[in-house]
Image (cartoon, rainbow, N blue to C red):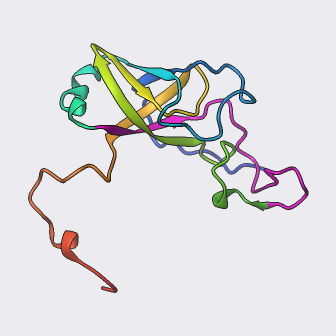
Amino acid sequence: MTLPTATDAGLVFVGRIHTPWTSRMDTPRQGRQDGPLCRIEIFDPWVPALDGLEQYERVEVIYWLHLSRRDLVRQSPAHDGAARGTFSLRSPVRPNPLGTSVARLVGIEGATVLVRGLDCLDGTPLLDLKPDRTLFTPIAPPQPGDLQTGNP
């Protein structure tokens, strides 16, 4: 497939993820909450953005799968000839190779966040960290859309 011309989304890497895995074939398909301890290095000037994160048990880690192909629309993950659309898979091969993991927060040491539950290669660029949405209660006052249910 020929990729369309890229437009700049203005993404900034805010850190780097350090894991035990240097080969995609050794990396788990999905992280485990009891998996190896991984270190997320936060770059300046983003270190103060960690303030308050320690109060959460789990964090959503959003990263850029920098070594992934971006040109497959259909894939056969079982290598059995049965292809599925890329959007129906959690494969790292995607048009925009974003990776996400909900990881268990072990601790924060200065500019380093310690977690378990990742599934990415050592050196993966970090895009963002967020509290796990199932643990987060919005701090700001409610907006009208917060209370909507059903069809508008």
The residue lying at 45 percent from left, 38 percent from top is 62
In magenta stretch: residue 68: yes
Please state, as top left, top right, bottom left or bottom right, where the C terminus lies in the image. Answer: bottom left
What residue sits 24% from the left and 32% below the top? 53
Classify residue 36 as left or right of residue 152: right
Where does residue 109 sit, x and y in percent of width and height? 29, 14
Q: Nearer the viewer, residue 17 or 96?
A: 17
Please tell me whether residue 116 is drawn above or below residue 78 in the rendered image: above
| Foreground residue among 110 and 107 | 107
Q: Quick check: can you spot residue 117?
A: yes
- Taking depth in this image into account, of 5 and 36 the one nearest to the observer is 36
Whether residue 127 appears in magenta in the rendering, the answer is no
Direction from residue 14 to residue 146 in the image, left or right:
left
- Residue lying at 58% horizontally and 34% vertically, measured from the top left: 119
Magenta stretch in the rendered image: 57-83
Tell me where residue 19 appears, x and y as whole percent: 55, 20
- Residue 100, position as x, y percentages in the image: 50, 42
